[in-house]
Image (cartoon, rainbow, N blue to C red):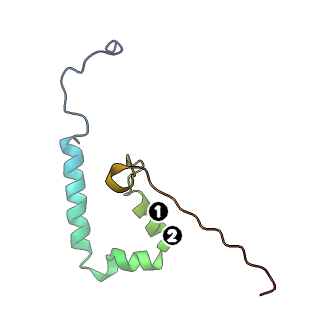
Amino acid sequence: MGAPKNHAKAGGRKAGVPNKMTRTVKETLQYAFEMMQTKPKVNLVEWGEKNPTDFYKLVQKLIPQAIDATISGTDGGPIKNEMTVRFVSGSD
């Protein structure tokens, strides 16, 4: 049986900290990727140029899915919008 709802966390790693295996796998893949880029037959740039759709599908996986951001104007105030409408006759 699991822990009761709304209980305090009791142990484990802190939220957001990847486990050692995930970190090791990512580091190993990054190293292999860097080594492969020196070989013309497996160069990612070349592959991306030949397969742009598949390349961008991979790239989009690296972009954060949610961004927590606040946009404000000068000195943290509201953003000011200004619009000018100009009417011109069609006979000019």
Q: Secondary structure at mark 1?
A: helix
Disc number for residue 89: none
Q: Secondary structure at mark 2?
A: helix
Location of residue 44 in the rendering, given as x and y in whole percent from the top left corner = 35, 74
Residue at 21% in and 40% down: 19
* In contact (CB < 8 Å): disc 2 and disc 1: yes
Residue at 24% in and 21% down: 9
Q: Quadrant of residue 32?
A: bottom left
Location of residue 88 in the rendering, given as x and y in whole percent from the top left corner = 73, 78
Residue 28 vertical position relative to residue 49 in the rendered view, above or below: above
Q: Amino acid at mark 2?
A: Thr
What separation in Å lies between label 2 and label 1 (alpha carbons)? 6 Å
40, 53: nearer the viewer: 53
Residue 16 vertical position relative to residue 32 in the rendered view, above or below: above
Quadrant of the frame with the C terminus? bottom right
Q: Amino acid at mark 1?
A: Lys
Query: Which residue is disc 2 drawn over?
Result: 53
Residue at 33% in and 80% down: 41
85, 38: nearer the viewer: 85
